[in-house]
Amino acid sequence: MHKLEKQGTLEQYNKIIQDQLQQGIVEPASDKVKGREFYIPHKPVILESAETTKMRIVYKASARTDDKSPSLNQCLETGPPLQNQLWDVLVGNRLHAINISGNLKQAFNQVRT
């Protein structure tokens, strides 16, 4: 928080957190601990050259509480790699007269275990 205050970005960071709270991406921590809990570290990434989103929050899901504990990334089921299908999508789009594309806003923010 001290670093954000020095940079003058604490208010902007807080606004992003509040927006994510409202959207259900993050949730407030309970005052009472129920068993073992771990909170994902996060930090701002600021891109002054960006046209739309100057600041975004990056959550470090590879963080571990200790050497014996797995990270959140290690606990998730990965599934098959999707990169192989990208070529099929790119080539398949060339077969149609009209194509529609879009940009997903904050596509990977929600994590469920």
Image: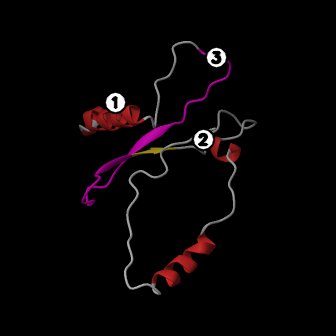
Which residue shows up at 70% across the image and 50% down it?
77
Q: Are marks 1 and 2 in contact (CB under 8 Å)?
A: no
Labels 3 and 1: the sequence-earlier one: 1
User: Which residues lie in the magenta part?
Assistant: 33-56
Which residue shows up at 49% across the image and 50% down it?
108
Instruction: Estimate the spatial distance between the alpha carbons at disc 1 and disc 2, rounded to whole Å.
Output: 22 Å
Read off the residue under disc 3: 34
Residue 31 % position (x, y): 51, 13
Residue 12 % position (x, y): 27, 38
In-image side of 89 versus 15 (left or right)? right
Quadrant of the image containing the C terminus: top right
Q: Main secondary structure of the magenta part?
A: loop
Instruction: For marks 3 and 1, give the one nearer the viewer.
Output: 3
> Could you tell me the amino acid type at mark 1?
His
Q: Outermost residue toward the top?
A: 32
Question: Label 2: few (<14), some or many (≥20) within 10 Å?
Answer: some
Labels 2 and 3: the sequence-earlier one: 3
**Figure quadrant of residue 111:** top right
Quadrant of the image containing the N terminus: top left
Read off the residue under disc 2: 63
Instruction: Estimate the spatial distance between the alpha carbons at disc 3 and disc 1, rounded to whole Å.
Output: 29 Å
> Could you tell me the amino acid type at mark 2?
Ala
